[in-house]
Amino acid sequence: MLSKYELKLPDTVYGGEDALDKIGRILAANGVKKAAVFADKGVERAGLLDIPLEKIRGAGAEYCVLDDLPPEPSYMEAQKLVDQCKAAKADFIIAAGGGSVMDTAKLASILMTEEYGVKELLDNPARARKCLRTLMIPTTAGTGSEATPNAIVAVPEKQLKVGIVNGDMIADYVILDVAMVKDLPRKIAAATGVDALAHAIECFTSRKANPFSDLYALEALDLILNHIQPACDSPDDIAAKRSVQIASFYAGIAIAASGCTAVHALSYPLGGRYHIPHGVSNAVLLAPVMRFNEPACRDKFAEAYDRCIRGGAVTAEEKSEALIARLEEIVRHLDIPTSLTELGVRSEDLPQLVSGGMEASRLLVNNRREITPADAAEIYRQLL
Ligand SMILES: NC(=O)c1ccc[n+]([C@@H]2O[C@H](COP(=O)([O-])OP(=O)(O)OC[C@H]3O[C@@H](n4cnc5c(N)ncnc54)[C@H](O)[C@@H]3O)[C@@H](O)[C@H]2O)c1
Ligand SMILES: [Fe+2]
């Protein structure tokens, strides 16, 4: 547990029923003349831009929609939208989408300059300063990007995903309205929900864990473990969907206060090389990495069990085992693949996966049990 810690949060967060109604007030308070609305085609097809655009028109502001963005964009694809935002001469940024959209919008908010772009931030993320204020409206429940200072981009030449961290990317405003996630297709709800679950348990067991991150990580874990299944299975269980939406925001705050560990580290080459969706690659690795970490995390797992599962286990070892078993059960129940072979990974790719995973030292240093290249290879091998 860290003895010194800090936490930077979004300025204002609106949640609950009809939170989208606050868009007009936010635009008026910031004197917005033209908003750049970041989205993607999937979000648009789902009709999720209709309400935000109506609210912008109602506030008398102009807008442009920037939606030419694939899931899990590369730094070049993100740069393309940053350039479009510059050309549009917008004075405010709204992101309505999942992590891919929000991360790109956050990068744009610190890149309204000709001096450097996304590529340069890969090497020196601290150089940029906030240029435009932002409103994040997540449509997955999920990444928690609305609460974090992180933006993740794919780097094709390294076949990796890389995180850019800069405190100025913390959102100014966040709207958590269940209307944006209530019709998520089950497959997307499952993968993105397990991503949030990974954030919660990784941050809770991180070497950078501290009282601030524990507060949010444990509450997120409790909400997700107890609501993710109905949220994905029952189209009408709005209360469960709202719980996972809030939990993913809390887990994002836990990331901002602490940091993810080896699940995310080993997942980055799977995203970078095989384009496996972020939530799916984390889901595959979640239980195996936690099982590897168990000897170093037993007390934390037992504490999480007492708070979130509250079953009949007595010893720390039983509680810890029950928690890991619950993670496995969730991934299986949600029909997320549990084998890397199913996802196209071949055994001859293992050395490259291992070296890619080991490059994510920003996250590996947070893992309570040290992971050597041989350990990483064994974890990947178990999953083939
Ligand atoms: N910044 C952070 O702190 C952070 C944390 C974790 C992950 N990430 C990054 O976020 C990205 C993944 O984001 P994601 O998991 O939210 O997925 P995503 O944004 O890539 O979206 C996945 C798909 O779901 C569609 N979609 C989104 N919302 C929808 C809705 N409500 N209804 C129907 N379709 C919808 C999108 O159009 C897209 O096709 C990755 O690049 C990952 O590395 C960032
Ligand atoms: Fe994640």
Image (cartoon, rainbow, N blue to C red):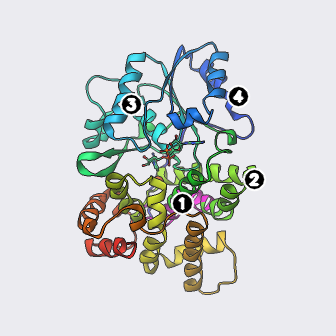
Disc 1 designates what residue?
Answer: 200
What percent of the width, then of the height, locates residue 88?
Answer: 42, 17
Q: Distance between the residues labelled 1 and 4?
A: 30 Å
Give the amino acid type for the residue marked by disc 2 in the picture.
Answer: Asp
Q: Does the residue labelled 3 lie within 8 Å of ligand 1?
A: no
Disc 2 designates what residue?
Answer: 237
The residue stretch that appears in magenta: 201-220
Q: Which of marks 2 and 1 is in front?
A: 2
Q: Distance between the residues labelled 2 and 1?
A: 22 Å
From the viewer's perspective, is residue 372 above or below residue 18? below
N-terminal label among 2 and 4: 4
Q: Residue 146 versus residue 79: which sits nearer the camera?
A: 79
Q: Is residue 215 magenta?
A: yes
Q: Quadrant of the C terminus?
A: bottom left
Disc 3 designates what residue?
Answer: 110
What percent of the width, then of the height, locates residue 242?
Answer: 69, 49
Give the amino acid type for the residue marked by disc 3 in the picture.
Answer: Ile
